[in-house]
Image: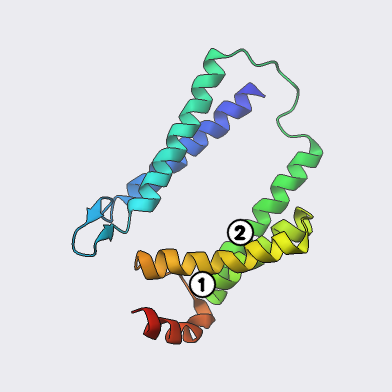
């Protein structure tokens, strides 16, 4: 189990370094012209945090003696990891066609209600408020456009209102 933990942490560190390298192609600091962070700021710094967290996992595994509890994934956990991974791949595949404002709420609806078995009030609250938050945070505040796919014409009145 310890070997698997270290291997996954090392893989996350490599993936984080790759993401930071690509994000640094865009400005990662404060952009004085637009009055906000550069286009690569959030991907870069979130990847840096992921890199540090994975490094912490490796350091902890070296300093703390962890009892070997058997396989890293039992069959039930492996099924859950596969189900969520497949749903995330489907969500990413939907984004160019349906857009972020359709794909993400569909993922949240599936994850919260059908996979997590949460109540309808919580599920619908998060599912409906997340796209609203994302629109105002990314598009209105940061001026970073998210993919909209076939829903692009529905945003024209909002663009007229906020831009």
Q: Position of residue 107 (x, y in %)?
A: 65, 62
The quarter of the displayed image where residue 64 is located: top right
Q: Position of residue 26 (x, y in %)?
A: 28, 56
Tag shown at residue 154: none
Counting labels gives 2
* First in residue order: circle 2 vs circle 1: 2
95 to 28, vertically: above or below: below
- Residue density around tag 1, few if under 14, some if 14–19, many if 20 or more, within 10 Å: some
Callout 2: SS: helix
Q: Nearer the viewer, residue 53 or 96?
A: 53
Q: Position of residue 150 (x, y in %)?
A: 53, 82
- What residue sits right under mark 2 in the picture? 89
20 to 2, vertically: above or below: below
Q: Is residue 160 left or right of residue 37?
A: right
Q: Is residue 99 left or right of residue 24?
A: right
Q: Which residue is situated farthest in the left direction here?
A: 33
Q: Nearer the viewer, residue 87 or 137?
A: 137
Question: Is any atom of residue 83 visible in this view?
Answer: yes
Q: Residue at x 28, y 59 (%)?
A: 36
Q: Position of residue 115 (x, y in %)?
A: 76, 55
Q: Nearer the viewer, residue 33 or 19?
A: 33
Structure colour scheme = rainbow
- What residue sits right under mark 1 in the picture? 96
The quarter of the displayed image where residue 143 is located: bottom left
């Amino acid at each position: 189990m310890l070997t698997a933990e270290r291997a996954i942490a090392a893989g996350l560190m490599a993936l984080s370094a790759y993401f930071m390298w690509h994000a640094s192609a865009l400005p990662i600091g404060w952009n004085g012209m637009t009055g906000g962070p550069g286009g690569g700021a959030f991907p870069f710094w979130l990847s840096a945090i992921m890199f540090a967290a994975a490094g912490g996992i490796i350091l902890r595994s070296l300093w703390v003696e962890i009892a070997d509890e058997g396989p890293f994934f039992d069959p039930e956990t492996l099924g859950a990891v596969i189900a969520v991974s497949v749903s995330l791949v489907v969500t990413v595949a939907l984004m160019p066609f349906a857009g972020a404002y359709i794909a993400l709420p569909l993922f949240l609806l599936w994850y919260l209600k059908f996979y997590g078995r949460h109540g309808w009030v919580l599920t619908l609250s998060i599912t409906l408020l997340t796209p609203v938050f994302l629109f105002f945070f990314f598009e209105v505040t940061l001026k970073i456009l998210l993919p909209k796919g076939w829903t692009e014409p529905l945003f024209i009145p909002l663009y007229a209102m906020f831009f």
